[in-house]
Image (cartoon, rainbow, N blue to C red):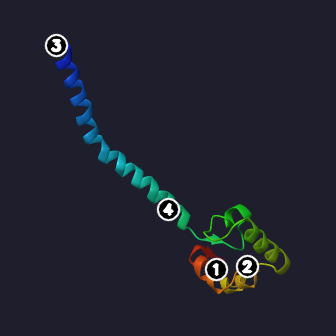
Amino acid sequence: MNWIRLMGWMVMTIMMSNLYLYPAQVALAQTASATQSAAAMKPVSINKADSEELQTVRGIGPALADRILEYRSANGNFKSLDQLKEVKGIGDSKFEKIKDQITL
């Protein structure tokens, strides 16, 4: 067998193995993504979370997280999720965006 033919077979073998392995790689990537999404979907406790954890909520940045902590420190734990609207920077619109991501 000459070298060119041997190289052709090697390239073909590699290409075929990639065709069989690719779906498995995609499935693993999707599983990892779903796991990360599930972790991200776990509600954050506004009564227990620190600044870093509050910032995992889409719509809460460092400044707003600090204001939530300051409010909690001055007034005690939140009694209801709606009480979060008393924090400067959280109006009806912001509250609607984050309410599914938070818990007491």
Residue type at numbered disc 2? Gly
Q: Quadrant of the N terminus?
A: top left
Q: Is residue 7 left or right of residue 25?
A: left
- Secondary structure at badge 3 equals loop
> Closer to the observer: label 1 or label 4?
1
Q: Give the mark nearer the N terminus: 3 vs 1.
A: 3
Q: Give the mark nearer the N terminus: 1 vs 4.
A: 4
Q: Give the mark nearer the N terminus: 3 vs 4.
A: 3
Label 2 packing within 10 angstroms: few (<14), some (14-19), many (20+): some
Q: CA distance from mark 2 to mark 1?
A: 8 Å
Image disc number at residue 89:
2
Callout 2–callout 1 Cβ contact below 8 Å: yes
Picture coordinates of residue 90, whole percent (x, y): 70, 80
Residue denoted by label 4? 37
Q: CA distance from mark 3 to mark 4?
A: 52 Å
Residue type at numbered disc 3? Asn
Picture coordinates of residue 61, whole percent (x, y): 69, 67
Image disc number at residue 2:
3
Q: CA distance from mark 1 to mark 4?
A: 21 Å
Above or below, 4 relative to 92: above
